[in-house]
Amino acid sequence: MANVRCTNSYSDVTAERNNFILGWQPTTWMHGYNESVPWSLRTRLERAFLFTTTDHEYSFTGKITNYPAGGYVADLTEHADLATSLIQDLEANHWIDEYTRAVLVEFNVLNPNSKLFNQVVLLFEYTTDGSTLWTTSVHEVQLYRYAGSAGVVALLSEIGCAIFMVVITVLEVIKICRMRLRYFKGVWNVLE
């Protein structure tokens, strides 16, 4: 039990938002560190230790708390060898350490048979006592709604229904303007 160590619980107020160099060392500890180097010119490993903010993304709710958008992002490439190398470098530099409260793994999967994209989010939350809780979220998105001849028929049907609804609505509004309060005395007018 001598190895058990509790740390502070997560809150949005105490969340770290500073940039670091490899191994979570403050940038002030490295002589000659140039913060003016653009983000795009840094390696994927260096970018993993830089805090990233986003305004257009949503927060994610886990079992312990709600995590806002942004944080320290390790962007894996689509090449398996480069992704494996980055994961090994992150492990060697202790990217996930005792101060890590959550790791979100996000990826998309395409099922060509059903033409569905699946957005998958795996959340691993680390409690103050060292245990791990996990949460999954899977959302299906149909991007190719009007594919093939059946899709064209569905699109034309939806356009026809929309035009029909607009015409009927305009005709009823004209009828209301002409008849005024008498319009609402007729049972069929109210039902339409």
Image (tube, grey):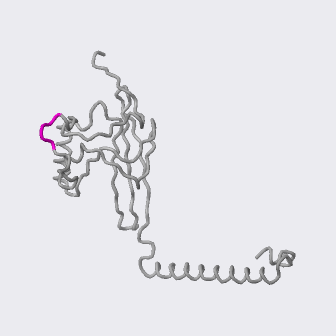
Residue at 19% in and 54% down: 80
Which residue is more in the foreground, 122 or 180? 180
Residue at 43% in and 49% down: 137
Residue at 68% in and 82% down: 170
Q: Is residue 99 above or below residue 112?
A: above
Q: Quadrant of residue 87?
A: top left
Please check the rendered image and state whether residue 166 is part of the magenta-colored stretch, yes or no. Answer: no
View extreme (left): residue? 32
User: Along the horizontal axis of the image, is 170 left or right of 7?
Assistant: right
User: Along the horizontal axis of the image, is 158 left or right of 170?
Assistant: left
Percent across and percent down for residue 24 are: 22, 36
Q: Quadrant of residue 22?
A: top left
Q: Is residue 45 above or below residue 109?
A: above
Which residue is more in the foreground, 169 or 150? 169
Quarter of the image with the N terminus in it:
top left
Q: Quadrant of residue 32?
A: top left
Which residue is more in the foreground, 84 or 45? 45
Percent across and percent down for residue 144 are: 41, 71
Quarter of the image with the C terminus in it:
bottom right
Q: Which SS type dominates the magenta stretch?
A: loop
What span is in magenta?
A: 29-33
Q: Is residue 26 above or below residue 45?
A: above
Percent across and percent down for residue 95 are: 24, 38
Percent across and percent down for residue 12 are: 42, 37
How many marks the image carries: the answer is: 0
